[in-house]
Each structure stands twice: as C-alpha cells, then as structure tokens.
Image (cartoon, helix red, strand yellow):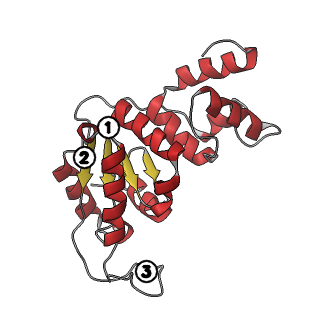
C-alpha cells in the first residue's frame, strides 16, 4: 500500500510526532490533545465534542498509563457513542528521536509500524478506504493565504475573527486550523463565511 488511506473519523492523538506519523499513512484530520494539557483545556474539549458530532472520533493514544489517563478524560467528556478507541500493542523499545525509553519502556504511537497502525484503526471500526461518505474539505494553505488568513499583514487578526465566528478556539495555529476547517467545512462554505466576515454579514 503506497498511498494514504482515507479515514472518515477525526483521529485524536497525544502529540505532534504521533500526528506526523499518522499523516504519512492516513488521509485524515488528526487533532492533538497536547498530552495532559487536555485536562485543563475546555476549548479543546468543546472542539473535540463538535468534531465528534460532525465526523466521529477515533482515539489513538500510547499504551502506557499516561495514554490511558488521557483516554479516560475523553471518555468522560464526550458522548461514548461518537467515539471509537484504537489500541496499539505493548512493544518494548524507544523511538529513534529519543535518548532514552519512556518510563514504561514501550514504543508509543509514533514508533509503530504502518501495518500495526492500519490494523489498530481497522479493529476499532474506523471508516477507512472510501467506506461510507467522507465529508472532507479541500482547503489548502494557499487558500488560507488567498483568503487573507495566513502569511500576510493582518492575517492573524483575520484568523482570530474567523475562529470567533465559527466558535473555535482562538489559539489554534494556522496548521491546526486547516485540519479543523477541512473536517467541518468545504472550501465553498469557507469562502462564503469569509465573505460574510468581510462584509459584516451573517455566517
């Protein structure tokens, strides 16, 4: 399998290295919890609830105690009917970028082989490879720039205004915002919203 595999659900991981690994394998929206940061981030939890209602979530954390604590937090905060849980096996070792192994000596999501991650999502019941309809936008970084949301004077202010209009966390980076926009809106919808923002009109 050479190409990336489409996944309908939004995949939730702990950190950016996990996200980078998954984006090499799956064509999906991937959102980070920021590790335990999710415990005190009401905005991120609200965003995950919204994504769960729109697309469904697949939670994929490390197999250590920390990963299960993050999972437990999400289980208590989001309707279980909207969440699927994917699990990786216990594999001893350490990721290449790390000087030493984790406290429990297990590989995390970022250290898993491609086929292991594909199997984990498949066993969790993720909608993969074109099964069912995938409502995913085609908004690119170039589109954000063209809409004045990235890379230009005043783009940060316009981005914050858009995030406020969409009831999304204002602290989302441009890259994180791109993932969320593609999970929730088509490019045409985003263009209409931005036009309304400039004119001061409704969403």
Circle 3 or circle 2, nearest the eye: 2
Q: Residue at x 50, y 42 (%)?
A: 179
Nearer the N terminus, badge 2 or badge 1? Answer: 1
Counting from the top left corner in percent of width and height, residue 77 is at 36, 45
Q: Mark 3 highlights which residue?
A: 96
Q: Is residue 110 above or below residue 172?
A: below
Counting from the top left corner in percent of width and height, residue 186 is at 49, 25
Q: Look at the image and tell me whether residue 113 can be seen.
A: yes
Q: Residues within 10 Å of mark 1 (few under 14, many from 20)?
A: many
Mark 2 to mark 1 CA distance (whole Å): 8 Å
Mark 3 to mark 2 CA distance (whole Å): 29 Å
Q: Do the numbered discs 2 and 1 sit on residues whose CB atoms are within 8 Å? A: yes
Q: Which label belongs to residue 56? A: 1
Q: Residue at x 54, y 20 (%)?
A: 189
Q: Which label belongs to residue 84? A: 2
Q: Is residue 154 above or below residue 189?
A: below
- Give the secondary structure at mark 1: loop
């Amino acid at each position: 399998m050479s190409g990336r595999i489409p996944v309908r659900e939004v995949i939730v991981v702990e950190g950016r290295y996990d996200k980078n690994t998954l984006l090499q394998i799956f064509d999906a929206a991937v959102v980070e919890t920021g590790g335990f940061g999710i415990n005190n981030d009401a905005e991120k939890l609200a965003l995950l609830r919204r994504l769960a209602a729109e697309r469904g979530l697949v939670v994929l954390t490390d197999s250590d105690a920390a990963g299960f604590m993050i999972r437990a937090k999400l289980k208590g905060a989001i309707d279980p009917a909207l969440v699927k849980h994917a699990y990786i096996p216990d594999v001893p070792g350490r990721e290449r970028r790390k000087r030493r192994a984790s406290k429990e000596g297990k590989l995390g999501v970022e250290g898993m082989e491609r086929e292991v991650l594909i199997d984990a999502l498949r066993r969790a019941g993720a909608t993969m490879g074109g099964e069912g309809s995938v409502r995913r936008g085609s908004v690119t970084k170039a589109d954000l720039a063209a809409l004045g949301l990235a890379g230009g004077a005043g783009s940060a202010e316009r981005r914050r205004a858009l995030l406020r209009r969409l009831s999304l966390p204002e602290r989302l980076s441009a890259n994180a915002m791109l993932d969320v926009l593609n999970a929730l809106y088509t490019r045409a919808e985003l263009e209409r919203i931005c036009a309304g923002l400039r004119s001061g009109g409704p969403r």
